[in-house]
Amino acid sequence: MKPIIFIAAVALLAATPARAQALVDPSKVAPEYREAAEKRRAEQIRQRECGLKADLEKVLPRDRTAYLNHCLDTLAAKQ
C-alpha cells in the first residue's frame, strides 16, 4: 500500500499546472496575419471581461457557459 501512495504523491508533485492561453500580440505576428491577430485579441479580451463578470457575480459552474454565451452575445450586439 505504501508504494501506491508514494507513486501517487510523486505523480501529483510532478504534474505541471495548466496555464491560460496568453493574449495574442499582433506586433509579433507576420504582417499578413496581423488583422486576424487583432481580431483574436479583441475576442480574447471580451471573453476575459465576461469571465471576470461571472467571477464577480459568483456564477455557479453549471450556469457559467450559459452566462458567458449571453454576455458575449450582449457585447456583440452593442458593437
Image: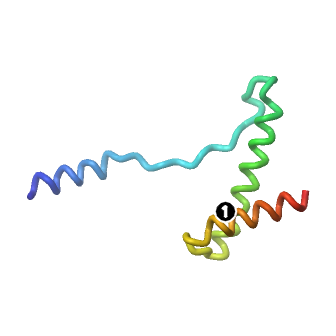
Query: Picture quarter containing residue 70?
Result: bottom right
Answer few, some or many: residues within 10 Å of disc 1's Cα (few below 14, many 20 plus, some between 14 and 19).
some
Q: Is residue 20 left or right of residue 77?
A: left
Quadrant in which the N terminus appears: bottom left
Q: Is residue 11 above or below residue 66?
A: above
Q: Residue at x 52, y 48 (%)?
A: 19
Q: Is residue 43 above or below residue 24?
A: below
Q: Residue at x 73, y 28 (%)?
A: 29
Residue furthest to the left in view is: 1
- Residue type at tag 1: Gly
The percent coordinates of residue 2 (x first, y second) are 9, 57
Toward the viewer: 50 or 62?
Answer: 62
The percent coordinates of residue 11 (x first, y second) are 27, 48
Q: Is residue 3 above or below residue 34?
A: below
- Tell me the residue that label 1 is attached to: 51
Q: Residue at x 57, y 49 (%)?
A: 20
The percent coordinates of residue 14 (x first, y second) are 31, 45
- Number of marks: 1
The percent coordinates of residue 63 (x first, y second) are 61, 72
Q: Is residue 43 left or right of residue 2?
A: right
Q: Residue at x 83, y 61 (%)?
A: 75
Q: Is residue 20 left or right of residue 78?
A: left
Find numbered disc 1 in the image and state the secondary structure of the residue it sits on: helix
Residue furthest to the right in view is: 79
Quadrant in which the C terminus appears: bottom right
Query: Picture quarter containing residue 64?
Result: bottom right
